[in-house]
Amino acid sequence: MSTNRVIFTIGILILAVPLTGFPRMWDEVFLIVAGIALILLSSINIWQRSIVKRLQFHSKQQINQDSTNEEVAPSYTSEE
C-alpha cells in the first residue's frame, strides 16, 4: 500500500474514533499514535519526493551537458 493510501486510511480512522464508543483513554491513546504515524508517514513521503525531484533534476542536467558536449566538442583528425 502506498504511503498516500495509508495516510488517507489513518485520516478516516481518526474521523471515526469519536463514533466508536471506546473509553476516553483508549480514544486518546489511539489519536496520539495515529498522529505520530501521520507525521512520520508524511515526512517520509515528502523526503522521498524531494529525493526523486533531485535525481530527476541531476539526470536532466547530465543529459543536457552530454548533448551540449557532443555539439561543441571538436573532432580531431590526424593530418599527415
Image: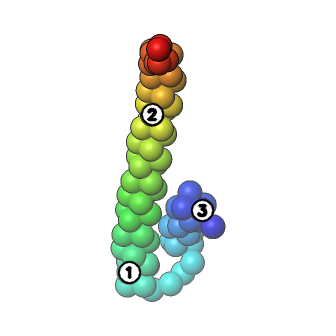
| Label 3 with label 1: CB-CB less than 8 Å | no
Whether 65 is drawn above or below 77: the answer is below
Q: Is residue 68 visible?
A: no
Whether 23 is drawn above or below 41: the answer is below
Q: Earlier in the sequence, mark 2 or mark 3?
A: 3
| Amino acid type of the residue that numbered disc 1 sits on in the rendered structure | Val
Q: Which mark is residue 62?
A: 2
State which quadrant residue 21 falls in: bottom right
Question: In the depicted view, which residue is nearer to us: 77 or 75?
Answer: 77
Q: Which mark is residue 16?
A: none
Q: How many labels, in total?
A: 3
**Residue 78 place in picture, x, y as percent:** 47, 18
Comparing labels 3 and 1, the label whose residue is closer to the camera: 3
Q: Earlier in the sequence, mark 3 or mark 1?
A: 3
Comparing labels 2 and 3, the label whose residue is closer to the camera: 2
- Please name the residue that numbered disc 3 is placed on: 2
Residue placed at 41% from the left, 42% from the top?
54
Q: Earlier in the sequence, mark 2 or mark 1?
A: 1
User: What's the distance in space between the residues labelled 2 and 3, CA to CA?
Assistant: 30 Å
- Please name the residue that numbered disc 1 is placed on: 29
Whether 20 is drawn above or below 38: the answer is below
| Label 2 with label 1: CB-CB less than 8 Å | no
Element class at badge 3: loop
**Residue 74 place in picture, x, y as percent:** 45, 15
User: What's the distance in space between the residues labelled 2 and 1, CA to CA?
Assistant: 49 Å
Residue placed at 50% from the left, 84% from the top?
22
**Residue 24 place in picture, x, y as percent:** 40, 81
| Amino acid type of the residue that numbered disc 2 sits on in the rendered structure | Gln
